Image: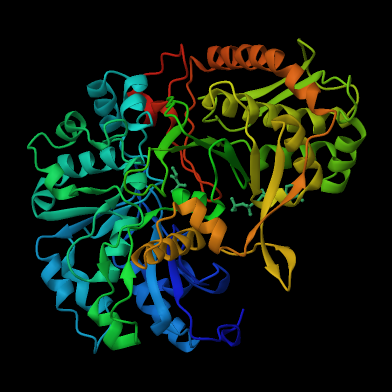
Amino acid sequence: MTTDSIPGSGPLFLGLDSSTQALKASLLDESLRVLSELTVRFDDDLPHFGTRGGVLTGDKGEVFSPVMQPIEALDMLLDRMKDAAWPVGRIRAISAAGQQHASVYWSRDASSIMSNADPGTDLASQLESAFSREIIPNWQDSSTVPECSAITVAAGGPDSLAQITGSSAHTRFTGAQIMKFVRREPMAYAETGRISLVSSYITTLLCLSDVKPIDESDACGMNLYDIKERKWSKKLLDVVDPSGQLEGKLGAVEKDSGAVIGTIGRWFVDRYGFDSECVVLPGTGDNPATFLSLNLGAGEGMVSLGTSDVVLVSTESYNPHPEFHAFLDPALGPGEQPRYFNMLVYKNGSLAREHVRNEYFSSSWDKFNAAVERLRPRQAGDKISKTAFWWLLPDIIPAGAKGVYKYDLTTRVEKFEDVDDEALAILSTQMTGYSVRSGDILSGGRLTKVFATGGAAKNPSILAVMADALGCDVAKSVSFENGSPKDADWNACSVGVATKAAWGYARTQGCTLRFDAFVKKAGTSGSHTVAAPGPGSQAYADSMPRWKQLEKESLDDSLAKQKAKPHYAGGVSISRQQSPEAALHPPRGNDIVLEEAHA
Ligand code: ADP
Ligand code: XUL
């Protein structure tokens, strides 16, 4: 994309994505077309921080990044916008996405430091003393097991914690991270004026005035927010900071995701030519932002087939469970009934499929696919008889499952007689699992449509099995160029928040539509169906009771084998890296002790 493609004089909308490894920007026009994108990669563009994959690590599970890294990246990104002649004066609204869970600690004089930023010089050289902590603990951190244990106990166990906050305790979640800071660095905590998530950190930098509020959807990734009551859980705040100061440091949560919460800072106007009336909307987490980019309706979902497999399910009711994460929908406007999205994360996704491909199909996806196509159920009456759970790494769902379990009907086997069954068995077992659990989230219903993303979503045989197993159409995001659809290749998170910025701006101009209706009306992008369920679909539905029985049998066996030497899994991303943490997710009936995580 070049700037030649940014003609005209209409309003533009900017989305930023402060992810683990990079700061990215997407520029959209009024019809929500992605005009251009720019990226600053932390490792390559800011090598003096010495990060790998955007982070630094300690020897006790600590994973963190320098608090100044996103600021230097922002300085560089703005220079790149200038070099690329982005018409920033036409940008009417901005919103930011940020890696979830990670927290930023402001000093007490942060607001006055920001308000006095001098446009004659870059931000990085002026904001160093705006922080009370030099690091941002990263979502891959697993050093907070004792704190998770305390939070779990205070809530009355993993089930009640999931009921209150949408998730059981996770080492990367902000509550445990703040608690560790309170316990280990009480002086620095006392000097902390405010605490942000990365999304509200970037939002604050855009306004350069006071510290901006945490967005409600992103607040659901903290183990501190009472989702049903839609307010901070006092009980949990008091566990994290018994002195009672935490609520003041976190500030009020922004519940209107399309609200104008500030205008662009003077520094951006004077130094780069932004319009002084450009408005800033609340930022949100990177996963909620991906959800926004797909504009998922209730009953729709997304299956991301990256390193790990991630399933998002949109719902109108709140059905939390310790196995997954429930968040409030990131596009709730004032007075709207709450909606939710749910996130399931599986570690043995592409990793396991690739292993089977290498082991049995000479490392060739073509051979793997040929096997699937030869055997997959296509006609009414066709049956599925083979099941294979490939838990090469201890998995998150089901928690702690480890080992390889293969069955011919209900008989456990070492390997399948017909080697081609290896390909279909892993795929149908994975996809049936996604169908079973999304069905549970939908209280027995089925998904009506799923978006496929991630590296393996280019594989048509995988998409065909997905459509049959989930019993619904599989779609991909597309952009339209000269009327013909083209698979979208943009950065979903920054596009999602830029779309929200366009909605927020439209609201300032009198638009009263909900986010989803606004996107349908304004948007020229869309989706196209890449696979649809065929007559063979019934075979997957029929196999579900056996699948459930076999998963339980395999899990019980796996956990019994591990009892002497427990394994812990964990870590999450739609498509990024993973980290260890799983002692916190004792599977049902398992008695792993939380504190044993680093044993
Ligand atoms: P991440 O963002 O987590 O790094 P990607 O979304 O890029 O991951 O997906 C990478 C994965 O996609 C690889 O692990 C690989 O196994 C899988 N993949 C790539 N091409 C194919 C294909 N044709 N069929 C199946 N899987 C594929
Ligand atoms: C989600 C999670 C990651 C981060 C970084 O729970 O930990 O996806 O949001 O991408």
Who is closer to the viewer here, 186 or 343? 343
List x then y, in percent, for residue 248.
Answer: 12, 47
Q: Residue at x 46, y 33 (%)?
A: 316
- Asked if residue 159 lies left or right of residue 478, the reply is left
Q: Is residue 550 left or right of residue 101?
A: right
Viewer-proximal residue, 417 or 317? 317
Residue 80, percent from left and from top:
46, 82
Which picture quadrant has residue 275? bottom left
Q: Is residue 31 above or below residue 274?
A: above
Q: Which is nearer the eye, 390 or 520? A: 520
Along the viewing direction, whichever of 417 and 372 lies nearer the viewer = 372
Q: Is residue 68 above or below residue 476?
A: below
Residue 7 in view here = yes
> Quadrant location of residue 35?
bottom right
Q: Residue at x 62, y 33 (%)?
A: 447
Looking at the rendered structure, the number of numbered marks drawn on it comes to: 0
Name the image quarter holding the C terminus: top left
Instruction: Report whether residue 51 is seen.
Output: no
Query: Which residue is at 55% across, 83% downward?
Result: 6
When the figure is inspected, residue 502 is found, relative to residue 291, above or below; the finding is below
Quadrant of image for the N terminus: bottom right
